[in-house]
């Protein structure tokens, strides 16, 4: 009996010994499931009986500040473990980033229990504070395939050809299933659709907090390429067939996978999205992320071309670059589907490189020399000649409809429509895609604003395909329906009938004695919309005050239908200026980008206050001004 009792005690004694043993563990660059930021990363976690220590890397714009809240905590198994100290950064104080844009500091927390497998880093409970979710402590290096994805959506045939574009118009429905969704990452999903008509259409849908699902339904003309984003972080991109209903299963851990890329550990493959529908195979293949090399020209950097190249030198450079990359693709070992897609995308870039050759050489100079003041003229650019640009037509068929399937759709369409060269004449083909794109230049924008005229429709009826006419008729009807729905809801203030030099004073004059917050914005500006969305709730809470006037100034680049649909949800006074008025005010205040803010105090004195792009400072400053 004693022997039996001793044997029974052994497991208990082992457990007690394990529990009493000191917890000392180090995990370098732990796998992170998701994050609402790309600013901070965890290089190492040290776990001891007395503390959990995070060795933290920060990457942000040089000479801009970040901050770590003193109320930061780790969360594991439903419990909080508070911040107890820091080295290299002072909690609740502004930390200014150095010239390199990189910094390192240490955060010390209460100890996590032994055996903790993962935790969340929560930089306080404010909505836009830093949050890292699912920080792994087991040492795993890759994510498993989500069980929720239906088996039929996991199939990929990389020996197939890239499918053809579809020329028709219909209502498309996209049901998005966000796997591993966390409401803290955002309550809305943005869907940006690039169309073969040369425009981008953006939609926003609420995410069901219980299911992680969101749904979009919209009129689509022709095959389109779309990408999803959550708080300006891309989750995946897809090809869409018009008039089709599809399901997309998106693995939200892609936000953590991007972090692996930044660390230089982008070697483990990851499937960020699963699709059904006409383009399912293409979508599944292109959303399989791995360490394949990049075969693009990188047009919009300082490395592509010297601004001092002559016209013939530049054309030869584009040609030689294209040929070298074509050879690399052919020898890459990529499966046929990806080879074809890489080649189509490269051809789009080559056409764009020629069409925008003058602009690109100037842009490369500005990028290299950090010279973004466009009052400074870049000298020495030899205008690209038609006969030099024409060399691209001998490299491949620029009239090939499959060029609509490459990854750079908008670049290709805008390049073909460029006013610098007549690509119909240079290619010698007066029928087909190139001619149709040039004949319909600007029509999509006009249709979306219900401004196509009878003469436009007569011209469209004479085209060699009915697709464009049918598309624009449906787009114009949709635009008119939206304008009718906004009637009586969208109020645009009358712009004062004064010289532009007195315009701003005339706008603010009726509100002297009050504080005015003047927001320069436009509907197409993502940061503008995000800032407005963040500010809007304050008008009903902390900043609800009759002595505070909100003024929103946009210009005519904001499409009228989008503008009238959007402003009913933005409380304040709305002005829509013409180009001359907008440019004058931008010069008057030195506005270098939007959103930009002008603060007007109770005496009528005003100044540009772009420091109020910091949401917390905006609120504090307005409250302070109201007290005066």
Image (cartoon, rainbow, N blue to C red):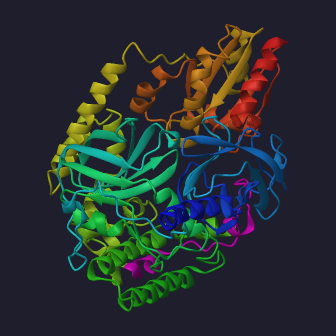
Instruction: Give the total number of marks visible in the rendering.
Output: 0
Q: Quadrant of the C terminus?
A: top right
Q: Quadrant of residue 188?
A: top left
In the rendered view, does 405 fall on the left or right side of 73?
left
Q: Is residue 434 visible?
A: no
Q: Quadrant of residue 123?
A: top right
**On screen, residue 364 above or below 211:** below
**On screen, residue 479 above or below 54:** above
Residue at 71% of width from left, 68% of height from top? 379
Q: Position of residue 205 (x, y in %)?
A: 38, 36
Residue at 67% of width from left, 17% of height from top? 542
Residue at 40% of width from left, 57% of height from top? 236
Q: Position of residue 331 (x, y in %)?
A: 38, 92
In this view, the residue farthest toward the front is 1
Q: Is residue 103 visible?
A: yes
Residue 549 or residue 531, whichever sits in front: 531
Q: Position of residue 539 (x, y in %)?
A: 61, 17
Extent of the magenta region? 366-392
Residue 318 or residue 458, whichever sits in front: 318
Q: Position of residue 488 (x, y in %)?
A: 39, 12
Q: Is 558 a magenta residue?
A: no
Residue 191 or residue 199, whichever sits in front: 191
């Amino acid at each position: 009996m004693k022997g039996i009792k001793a044997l029974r005690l052994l497991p208990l004694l082992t457990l007690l010994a394990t529990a009493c043993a000191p917890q000392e563990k180090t995990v370098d660059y732990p796998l992170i499931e998701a994050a609402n930021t790309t600013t901070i990363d965890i290089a190492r976690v040290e776990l001891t009986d007395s503390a959990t220590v995070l060795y933290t890397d920060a990457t942000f714009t040089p000479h801009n500040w970040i901050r770590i809240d003193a109320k930061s905590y780790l969360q594991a198994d439903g419990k909080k473990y508070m911040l107890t100290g820091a080295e290299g950064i002072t909690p609740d104080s502004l930390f200014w980033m150095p010239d390199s844009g990189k910094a390192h500091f240490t955060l010390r927390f209460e100890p996590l229990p032994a055996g903790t497998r993962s935790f969340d880093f929560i930089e306080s409970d404010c909505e836009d504070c830093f949050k890292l979710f699912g920080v792994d402590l087991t040492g795993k290096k890759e994510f498993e395939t989500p069980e929720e994805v239906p088996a039929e959506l996991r199939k990929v045939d990389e020996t197939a050809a890239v499918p053809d574009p579809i020329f028709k118009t219909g209502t498309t429905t996209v049901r998005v299933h966000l796997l591993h969704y966390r409401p803290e990452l955002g309550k809305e999903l943005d869907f940006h659709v690039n169309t073969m008509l040369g425009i981008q259409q953006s939609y926003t849908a609420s995410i069901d907090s219980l299911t992680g699902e969101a749904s979009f339904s919209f009129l689509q003309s022709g095959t389109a390429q779309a990408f999803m984003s959550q708080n300006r972080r891309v989750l995946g991109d897809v090809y869409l067939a018009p008039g089709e209903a599809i399901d997309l299963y998106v693995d939200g851990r892609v936000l953590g996978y991007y972090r692996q890329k930044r660390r230089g550990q982008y070697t483990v493959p990851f499937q960020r999205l699963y699709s059904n529908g006409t383009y399912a195979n293409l979508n599944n293949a292109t959303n399989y992320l791995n360490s394949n090399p990049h075969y693009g020209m990188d047009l919009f950097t300082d490395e592509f071309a010297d601004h001092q190249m002559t016209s013939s030198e530049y054309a030869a450079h584009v040609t030689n670059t294209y040929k070298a990359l074509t050879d690399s693709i052919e020898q890459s070992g990529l499966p046929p589907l990806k080879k074809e897609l890489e080649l189509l995308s490269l051809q789009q870039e080559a056409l764009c490189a020629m069409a925008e050759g003058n602009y690109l050489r100037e842009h490369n100079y500005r990028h290299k020399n950090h010279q973004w003041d466009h009052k400074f003229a870049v000298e020495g650019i030899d205008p690209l000649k038609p006969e030099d640009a024409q060399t691209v037509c001998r490299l491949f068929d620029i009239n090939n409809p499959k060029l609509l399937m490459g990854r750079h759709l908008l670049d290709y369409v805008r390049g073909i429509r460029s006013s610098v060269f007549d690509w119909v004449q240079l290619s010698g083909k007066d029928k087909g895609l190139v001619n149709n794109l040039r004949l319909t230049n600007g029509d999509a924008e006009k249709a979306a604003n219900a401004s196509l005229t009878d003469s436009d429709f007569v011209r469209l009826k004479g085209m060699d395909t009915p697709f464009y006419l049918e598309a624009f008729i449906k787009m114009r009807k949709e635009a008119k329906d939206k304008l009718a729905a906004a009637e009586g809801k969208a109020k645009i203030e009358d712009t004062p009938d004064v010289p532009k030099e007195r315009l701003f004073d005339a706008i603010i004059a009726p509100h002297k004695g009050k504080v005015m917050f003047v927001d320069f914005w436009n509907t197409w500006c993502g940061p503008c919309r995000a800032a407005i969305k963040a500010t809007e709730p304050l008008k009903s809470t902390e900043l609800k005050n009759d002595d505070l006037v909100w003024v929103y100034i946009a210009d005519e680049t904001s499409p009228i239908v989008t503008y009238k649909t959007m402003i009913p949800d933005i409380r304040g006074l709305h002005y829509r200026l013409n180009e001359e008025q907008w440019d004058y005010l931008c010069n008057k205040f030195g506005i270098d980008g939007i959103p930009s803010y002008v603060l007007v105090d109770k005496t009528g004195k005003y100044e540009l206050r772009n420091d109020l792009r910091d949401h917390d400072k905006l609120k504090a400053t307005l409250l302070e001004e109201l007290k005066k």
